[in-house]
Image: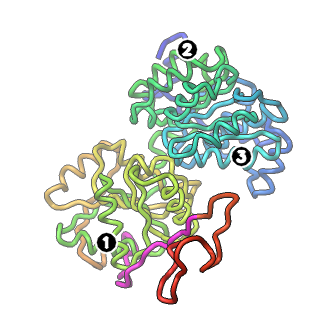
Amino acid sequence: MSDDLIKPSVYAPDGFVSEAAGAALGFAEAGVHTDLVQALAARGITKPFPIQSATLPLAIGGRDVLGRGQTGSGKTLAFGLAMLTQLASSRPRPGMPMALVLSPTRELAMQSAEVLTDFGHAVRVRTLLIAGGMGYDRQISALERGVHIVVATPGRLLDLVNRGSLDLSGVRITVLDEADQMADMGFLPDVRAILDSVRPGGQRMLFSATLDRGVDTIVDDYMNNPSVHAVDGGQASVAAMSHHLLVLNPGDKDAVVAQIGARTGKTIMFARSQLGAERIGEQLMAAGVPTGVLHGGKSQRVRNRTLQMFKDGGCNVLVATDVAARGIHVDDVSLVLQIDLPNNGKDYLHRAGRTARAGEAGAVVALTTTRQRARALTMLKRADVEVAAVYVTPMSDELVQVTGARLPSGRPWSAPVEREPAPAGRRRPPAGRGKGPRRTGGQRSRG
């Protein structure tokens, strides 16, 4: 990063200031709009998280902000409340949003849009979600009516810009959420194209775990003397978790995974590939473990339904791939099981970040075999995680103590089938009154 932007002496080795939050300002003292303060209080939110206390006063004042906080540290409200306060009761022009949030995945974009929409009602600010896997017509119609904030993934956003349905020149506040993940997924060229299209000299807020893989050049090229905050160390989330490496016989792996899945509490399991996630999900359901499977090969409708079922407790296990799980925000996940070892320590920490959120405790368990044990220990050391390898067998005392494993019921489980809604404006004809042959008593409806 260039010296004219930042004094190196105040930066930690990875490019972030390691600082306390300073005075613990309340939402009102930080400058949050009165109606938003009341909306927060109505939801039981009265005390800002450290990242919010640290960034809100400056962000509301229009300052560029560069922030880091562990997963679940409240970053969405940190930038969201600042945007909503600035845009309160303003009037957007058709096709020209006033603020933009870029997210690496549909799931993260959906969750950010949900928060902004919820609190936006209090100050009459409208938010639109733009992401792949969703229909164009509804998004274009909403843009034509005028929205204040667009929350989007880069690819779909550029599609609408190129169609002429979206003009970014009126965007005065731009947020890059999880910028390092966007870099990992190859989105930085699209991010640059988008930043070149928004209003020059507008406010920029960037939240990222690291400044590697080109994120630092985005800061250099597009941010103006940002206020920098890292209210917790880069490995703070690691300290809030218990970490375990379980070594097992390859032939015991399926039984051990099913027993961990039958535990009490929400569990996210990671597989390396889509096929692997599907296989694990099928095995768990066959053993009687209510399970959802999430990966990029599923339609957006199915992904939304699966994630909602996991949040609502319809299933306690979610099997996911790395890309699909990024941005999942479920506060009460008590265990992350890394069935397939990740490629590196950074991926391990991204996976681990699905637990120990919002101040809660959590456990992270990695499975390995004797042959992979040395590689696993090396990877964990690079992630700054010190852990001893423990050998386990199905329902062994060590397995139960670490994970809370239980014997699954053995009764196969399947997700409830959601009936497709009838097309708008049309009603299903009563049985026997529609066109076509009349059904006999032995025939069943195909609806």
- Residue shown at 44% from the left, 30% from the top: 187
**First in sequence: mark 1 or mark 3?**
3
Sequence-earlier tag: 2 or 1: 2
Q: Is residue 421 magenta?
A: no
- The residue wearing badge 3 is 117
Name the residue type under label 2: Leu
Residue 78 in the image: above or below residue 337: above
Q: Which residue is mark 1?
A: 283
Question: Looking at the picture, how far across and down is residue 257, in whole percent?
Answer: 31, 70
Q: Residues within 10 Å of mark 2 (few under 14, many from 20)?
A: some
Which region is colored magenta? 400-420
Residue 211 seen in render:
yes
Residue 175 in the figure: left or right of residue 284: right
Q: Nearer the viewer, residue 17 or 205?
A: 205
Q: Nearer the viewer, mark 3 or mark 2?
A: 3
Helix, strand or loop at mark 3: helix
Mark 2 residue element: loop
Q: Mark 1: which amino acid?
A: Gln
